[in-house]
Amino acid sequence: MSVLSNQKSAACHRKFIFRWCSLVFLCLAGLGSLGQSVSAADEWKLIPYRGLKYVSAANVKNFYRFTAIEEKGKKLIFKSPNLVMEWEINSQAIFINKVKFVLSFPVIKPTHRSIVSVVDLAKLIDPVLRPSYIQHTSKFDTVVIDAGHGAHDSGAVGLLGYEKNYCLDTALRLEKALKKRGFKTHMTRRTDRFLTLSQRVQVANSIKNSIFISVHYNSSDNRLANGIETYALAPQGTVSTNGGRASGFRKGNNRDGENIALATAVHAMAMHRMGVEDRGVKRARFNVLTGINKPAVLFEGGFVTHSGDAQRINGVEYREKLANTIADAIVGFRKAVGGKKR
């Protein structure tokens, strides 16, 4: 492929991602590109299968007013003028305008119909496609910023530095960026000090009218692992993306819709601006997210163990850009869910 073709392709992709950010998180028309609101006639038709409830791809298409579903092998592509959603049979990964999300349960096709779990429909797909429909949203004017690790807890040991230092520097830059945008902020730490995870949760829960973001950088024994991923708390009865046991008794923080909308706002904006590998919006039961009583996410800004990511992360320009990207995403999230304190 020619250089010109590559440039055109990259430009189209950037425009596609920009549409996603504007469409979903500025929430200009409720259903965005899906047009008119859903009518009462468009009901969910539940399909029980092996102890779970599902809905069909056709039901999803009709409810959200997609204009078509295109099937390509194991892939289902839902299309509207400015919105494309892609599923793959037997996979938990879906893509909405090229941004990756990881479902709690795979899309399956046990008979002639492709189906998705009601849990994923209610806890991921609907709040991402319709953030303004999330019920009982929190009004906030403050962001609690948690710089991961600290003091003797260095976090990941990278090729060029310690995770704890990158986290603190990014968090302090995020604080400045948010204040410029009119937010109040509260830092769990602003020096090289240690806090337990429960202390961080206690700090977050003590700040009224706030949301919470924990800033981290990633590591792996696989030196090829790279890119950005963003985590929201796993919903009740589901497992973490990276494994673990499901528990029907763990209720999380009862902010599932806001959690995934906040994670999507941050992650989509990072994909639009940072030019790195998309590892997806994921779910986890990290202790720092469990027990928090407000919208909360954990953001992994890249791998300190990957040569390319490490070079970027070690640069002041990358951390400054990342801080401004997260701040702009929080502005978009607040507009999308109507979460401004009055």
Image: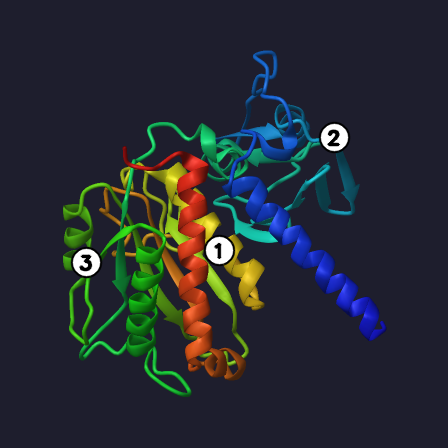
Q: Is residue 195 above or below residue 29?
A: below
Which residue is the extreme one toward the right? Answer: 2
The circle on residue 200 is 3
Contact, mark 2 vs mark 3 (Cβ under 8 Å): no
Per the model, the C-alpha gap separating discs 2 and 3 is 46 Å
Contact, mark 2 vs mark 1 (Cβ under 8 Å): no
Which residue is the extreme one toward the top? Answer: 41
Quadrant containing the N terminus is bottom right
Q: According to the image, label 2 marks what residue?
A: 67
Amino acid type of disc 3?
Arg
- The answer to whether one can see residue 132 in this image is yes
162 left or right of 241?
A: left
157 or 242: nearer the viewer: 157
Please tell me in which quadrant of the rendered image residue 139 appears: top left
Total numbered badges shown on the rendered structure: 3
Measured as percent of width and height from the top left, residue 117 is found at 53, 35
Measured as percent of width and height from the top left, residue 95 is found at 61, 49
Q: Which is nearer the N-term, disc 2 or disc 1?
A: 2
Q: Is residue 246 above or below residue 116?
A: below
Q: Residue at x 54, y 66 (%)?
A: 274
* Mark 2 closeness class: few <14, some 14–19, many ≥20 residues within 10 Å: few
Secondary structure beneath dot 3 equals helix
Per the model, the C-alpha gap separating discs 1 and 3 is 22 Å
Q: Residue at x 18, y 79 (%)?
A: 152
Q: According to the image, label 1 marks what residue?
A: 267
Amino acid type of disc 1?
His
